[in-house]
Image: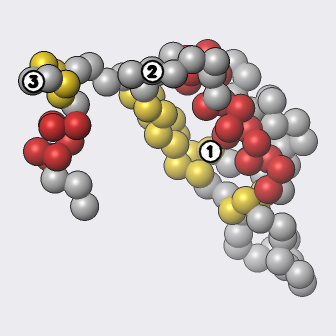
Amino acid sequence: MVAANDISRALTHDGAKMTVNMIMTGDVNLMNVADPGVPFAKVADEFRNTDVVFSNLECCLCETPPGHSVSNEGFFADPKAGKALTLAASSGRHRQ
Protein backbone atom coordinates (compact mmCIF):
# COMPACT_ATOMS: atom_id res chain seq x y z
CA MET A 1 0.00 0.00 0.00
CA VAL A 2 1.27 3.47 -0.87
CA ALA A 3 0.76 6.19 1.70
CA ALA A 4 -0.65 9.56 0.57
CA ASN A 5 2.46 11.40 1.77
CA ASP A 6 4.63 9.07 -0.38
CA ILE A 7 2.60 10.05 -3.43
CA SER A 8 2.85 13.72 -2.50
CA ARG A 9 6.65 13.48 -2.24
CA ALA A 10 6.77 11.71 -5.62
CA LEU A 11 4.86 14.60 -7.22
CA THR A 12 7.27 17.28 -6.09
CA HIS A 13 10.57 18.29 -7.56
CA ASP A 14 12.90 20.59 -5.64
CA GLY A 15 10.00 21.52 -3.36
CA ALA A 16 7.71 22.58 -6.24
CA LYS A 17 4.56 20.64 -6.98
CA MET A 18 4.35 19.02 -10.38
CA THR A 19 1.22 18.40 -12.41
CA VAL A 20 0.51 14.83 -13.44
CA ASN A 21 -2.04 14.09 -16.15
CA MET A 22 -3.89 10.76 -15.97
CA ILE A 23 -6.32 8.98 -18.25
CA MET A 24 -8.46 6.28 -16.70
CA THR A 25 -10.18 3.96 -19.14
CA GLY A 26 -12.81 1.36 -18.43
CA ASP A 27 -12.43 -2.33 -18.95
CA VAL A 28 -10.14 -3.40 -21.79
CA ASN A 29 -10.77 -6.80 -23.36
CA LEU A 30 -8.45 -7.90 -26.15
CA MET A 31 -10.29 -11.12 -27.03
CA ASN A 32 -10.54 -11.78 -30.77
CA VAL A 33 -8.09 -8.98 -31.65
CA ALA A 34 -6.49 -9.91 -34.96
CA ASP A 35 -4.58 -6.65 -35.51
CA PRO A 36 -3.00 -5.17 -32.36
CA GLY A 37 -2.79 -1.78 -34.05
CA VAL A 38 -6.56 -1.39 -34.07
CA PRO A 39 -7.87 -1.34 -30.44
CA PHE A 40 -6.27 1.95 -29.39
CA ALA A 41 -5.72 3.58 -32.80
CA LYS A 42 -8.19 6.42 -32.20
CA VAL A 43 -6.84 7.30 -28.74
CA ALA A 44 -3.13 6.47 -29.10
CA ASP A 45 -2.08 10.11 -29.44
CA GLU A 46 -3.97 11.01 -26.25
CA PHE A 47 -2.33 8.11 -24.41
CA ARG A 48 1.13 9.14 -25.60
CA ASN A 49 0.63 12.74 -24.51
CA THR A 50 -0.33 12.01 -20.92
CA ASP A 51 1.75 10.93 -17.95
CA VAL A 52 -0.24 7.91 -16.77
CA VAL A 53 -2.85 5.69 -18.38
CA PHE A 54 -4.71 3.33 -16.06
CA SER A 55 -6.88 0.53 -17.45
CA ASN A 56 -8.48 -2.63 -16.15
CA LEU A 57 -7.38 -5.52 -18.37
CA GLU A 58 -10.44 -7.80 -18.57
CA CYS A 59 -8.75 -10.79 -20.16
CA CYS A 60 -5.88 -13.15 -19.63
CA LEU A 61 -3.13 -12.87 -22.22
CA CYS A 62 -2.53 -16.59 -22.62
CA GLU A 63 -3.31 -19.48 -24.88
CA THR A 64 -6.68 -21.06 -24.13
CA PRO A 65 -6.03 -23.95 -21.77
CA PRO A 66 -6.30 -27.43 -23.32
CA GLY A 67 -9.82 -28.82 -23.06
CA HIS A 68 -11.27 -25.40 -22.25
CA SER A 69 -14.93 -25.19 -23.20
CA VAL A 70 -16.27 -21.91 -24.58
CA SER A 71 -19.18 -22.29 -22.15
CA ASN A 72 -16.71 -21.98 -19.23
CA GLU A 73 -16.16 -18.60 -17.63
CA GLY A 74 -12.93 -16.99 -18.65
CA PHE A 75 -11.71 -14.33 -21.02
CA PHE A 76 -8.63 -15.55 -22.83
CA ALA A 77 -6.89 -13.43 -25.46
CA ASP A 78 -4.06 -14.48 -27.71
CA PRO A 79 -0.81 -13.23 -26.14
CA LYS A 80 0.00 -11.54 -29.47
CA ALA A 81 -2.96 -9.21 -28.81
CA GLY A 82 -0.97 -7.80 -25.87
CA LYS A 83 1.12 -5.93 -28.43
CA ALA A 84 -1.83 -3.49 -28.55
CA LEU A 85 -0.88 -2.34 -25.03
CA THR A 86 2.72 -1.60 -25.95
CA LEU A 87 1.71 0.09 -29.20
CA ALA A 88 -0.67 2.39 -27.32
CA ALA A 89 1.98 3.25 -24.72
CA SER A 90 5.01 3.75 -26.95
CA SER A 91 6.14 7.15 -28.09
CA GLY A 92 9.21 8.70 -29.57
CA ARG A 93 9.85 10.94 -26.59
CA HIS A 94 10.59 10.62 -22.89
CA ARG A 95 8.90 12.81 -20.29
CA GLN A 96 10.70 14.05 -17.23
Measuring from the top left, give residue 28's x and y in whole percent.
62, 44
Q: Which mark is residue 95?
A: 2
Q: Which residue is mark 1?
A: 28
- Disc 2 vs disc 3: Cβ atoms closer than 8 Å? no
Q: Secondary structure at mark 1?
A: strand
Left or right of 90? Residue 84 is: right
Note whether residue 11 is visible: yes
Residue drawn 43% across the image and 32% down it: 52
- Disc 1 vs disc 3: Cβ atoms closer than 8 Å? no
Q: Secondary structure at mark 3?
A: loop
Amino acid residing under circle 1: Val
Left or right of 81? Residue 46 is: left
Distance in Å between CA atoms under marks 2 and 1: 25 Å
Label whose residue precedes the other's in the sequence (2 or 3): 3
- Judging depth in this view, the residue of 89 and 73 nearest the camera is 89
Label whose residue precedes the other's in the sequence (1 or 3): 3
Instruction: Please state which of the two labelled residues, at mark 1 or mark 3, is closer to the viewer.
Output: 3
Q: Which mark is residue 85?
A: none
Tell me the crowding category of disc 3: few under 14, some 14 to 19, or many 20 or more residues within 10 angstroms, Cα based. Answer: few
Q: Which residue is mark 3?
A: 15
